Amino acid sequence: MPWLPTESQGSNSPDMMLKTKRFEGERHVGRIKLSVRHHQYIAAVPFPQFTLILVQAGSKRVAGNGMARINADAGSLLAIASGSVLTLENLPSAQGRYEALCIEIETGLARTVASEMASIDSAPPVHCVPRPRAFLDEALGRLAQGLGDESLPTAVLTARVAEVIAGLEAESVPVWSMCRPSLAERVRRCLAADLADPPSPGAVARDLHLSAPTLRRHLATEKTSYSELLSDLRLSAGLAWIQGSDTPIAQVAERCGYASASRFTERFRARFGVTPSALRNGERARTASD
């Protein structure tokens, strides 16, 4: 994933295993295996790519993008459209754990293997499959296993992505429509390679064969900007590092392009409603009922 670390950096709670497989250019598939022991409430989480979340223990609540709240119990599969910004709650089971398998499929790759005939005019930001049939559950397992196998040929992994997409479409998930390309997505690709020292707006415009004013104007029509996209990427990367490793917060801040840990903490809390240290320690600065 362009905004996620590619290796797990520790085993402290919350436990998470991160794996990313890159294809040609910017195309990639990433896997997160998440296990947490406390209730998490995280506001305004951006999903720049098509993402699948299979809840394996506990439950997940998802809201945002003008939709009614979705409650996903253990066994449910959530498909999240690229470009969505959602509020998430992870609730442990009676046994004390929330566990989920998360798979991010780069939008262009997903559209390459999706069926255009399966598209609809207006796709929901989140599609919930309460009980995926065995063929889809097994396909997800094979894809997740393949992402952890460094020796697996790219062609085989691509076939496993295609198998998952076909399974989703068989469950009436409109994958093509949930992966609409945008200029914002292309800008994200330019910025994601180096969040600590990203290319300037002018450099991004040149890479996309546009003038800087044209880039600003087209991003404005998509209700975003260079600075908003960069901020989203940096905070998304920070969220992944905080949840997925025991890397010191100061190092996370530096890797994400922040001048200080305090500045990172300020922006993180403003965006997600919780500080990095509180999220790691299971504290909550705000809950859905506050």
Image: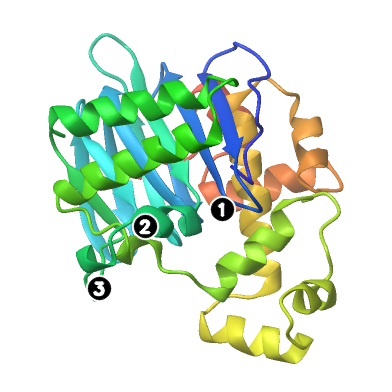
Q: Quadrant of the N terminus?
A: top right
Quarter residue 142 falls in: top left
| Marks 1, 2: nearer the viewer | 2
How far apart, in angstroms, are the residues tagged by discs 1 and 2? Answer: 20 Å
Q: Residues within 10 Å of mark 1 (few under 14, many from 20)?
A: some
Residue at image x 18%, y 30%?
A: 135
Residue at image x 13%, y 33%?
A: 131
Residue at image x 60%, y 11%?
A: 11
| Residue receiving disc 3 | 122
Q: Secondary structure at mark 3?
A: loop
Towards the viewer: 140 or 285: 140
Residue 81, disc: 2
| Residue receiving disc 1 | 271
Marks 1 and 3, the one that precedes in the sequence: 3
Towards the viewer: 179 or 43: 179
| Marks 1, 3: nearer the viewer | 3
Residue 235, disc: none
Towards the viewer: 120 or 78: 120
Quarter residue 112 falls in: bottom left
